[in-house]
Amino acid sequence: MITKPKFMTLERFIREQEESFPKATGEFTAVLFGMTLAAKLVWREVSKAGLVNILGTTEQINFTGDILKKLDLFADETLYKTMYYSGHLCAMASEESKGLIQIPDKYIGGKYVLIYDPLDGSSNIDANITIGTIFSMFKRVTDSGHGTLEDCLQPGYRQVAAGYIIYGTSTMFVYTTGQGVHGFTLDPSVGEFLLSHENIRIPQRGKTYSVNEGNFNLWDDRIKKYIQYLKEINGKPDHPHSLRYIGTMVGDIHRTLLYGGIFMYPADKKNPNGKLRLMYECNPMAFVVEQAGGKASNGFQRILDIKPTSLHQQIPIFIGSPVNVTLCEEFLSGKR
């Protein structure tokens, strides 16, 4: 019987997963290796952000009108520069870019697409609050050459990998390839991500909810009714629920993944189609949470079944423990 080594690095874990697929070419593994390097480079700057002139804003404004944070811009450039030359990607898309990011002709030919949010929660940077990177991978559907929108705009169930890197009290790399969810914590002394959370399983139900309740007056009455229900005692052991909200999707969903409950970003009067982006945030997080035994919905439909219409499509999201999300859907459908 082969015993697992005491210290399992992320690179070794990825390599051993590859060995389970005899026809694997190594391209998929190489892309994941590139993501681990990008994560370390971004972590290095995040960890010293308060010591150098990297906090605060640049004079650049992205296409949605948001002023870019310096660290936001650094993370975006780092992911691109780390990943474009691998030869395993045909295209990339970033939340900070309006359209498709083409791979230079010299390096084109890969069969994968990488979609990413370089720094989720960037509004929290100056306050030294948890932020993160979110990524998603698809296998291209076109035959060759430069990647197209068709390669990117695939429903989430076709993802071949997704995950996030959370920069908090420690830095963690959490990902799935459809074979469960695994978390690796960075040991800065050796520069390696080490397996710390193997086969993460979200609790079937939880007693916390995570939502920006400052938007309460902008919500539909059905959402208001659901939130009020969570606050009631109801004579049940899991009532009332506690509010836990960081304001960074990565941080809030990471906590929900480990302890159970529900994270929500409903549609409202200001954002009737929702605010969070399907391709950059909702799809990858839904894939991770579902692989851990959870559920992700727009309130009426499974997130991973939604056919995207644009790179920056926005949707509502309700994600977390299956019992909690199902109950929320009942309120939204008027059954409660």
Image (cartoon, rainbow, N blue to C red):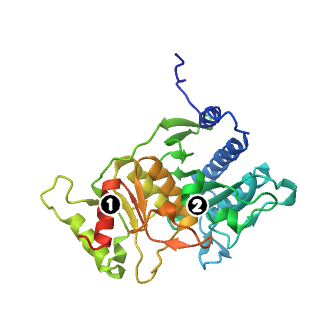
Q: Position of residue 180 (x, y in %)?
A: 49, 42
Observer-nearest of 259 and 325 = 325
On the rendered structure, is 72 left or right of 148? left
What residue type is disc 1 on? Thr
User: Based on the displayed image, in which of its 4 quarters is residue 62 positioned?
Assistant: bottom right
Q: How many marks?
A: 2
Residue at the left extreme of this rendering: 235
In the image, farthest residue toward the right: 106
What mark, if any, has residue 326 been given in the picture?
Answer: 1
- Is residue 300 rendered to the left or right of residue 206? right
Whole-number angstrom distance, CA of label 1 to CA of label 2? 30 Å
Mark 2, Cα crowd under 10 Å, few <14 / some 14-19 / many 20+, is many
> Which quadrant of the figure has residue 244?
bottom left
* Quadrant hosting residue 296: bottom left
The answer to which of marks 1 and 2 sits earlier in the sequence is 2
Say the numbered circle drawn on residue 130: none
Which amino acid type corresponds to the residue marked 2 in the rendered image? Leu
Q: Which residue is mark 2?
A: 119
* Quadrant of image for the C terminus: bottom left
Q: Position of residue 209 (x, y in %)?
A: 32, 61
Look at 46% across and 75% down and name the residue there.
274
Whether residue 249 can be seen here: yes
Residue, x 58% and y 69% (percent of image)?
308
Task: Please name whichever residue, 151 or 48, is drawn nearer the observer in this view of the structure.
Answer: 151
Q: Position of residue 121 (x, y in %)?
A: 51, 63
When the figure is inspected, residue 313 is found, relative to residue 280, above or below; the finding is below
Q: Could you say which is closer to the camera, residue 55 or residue 283?
A: 283
Tell me if label 1 and label 2 are in contact, CB under 8 Å. no
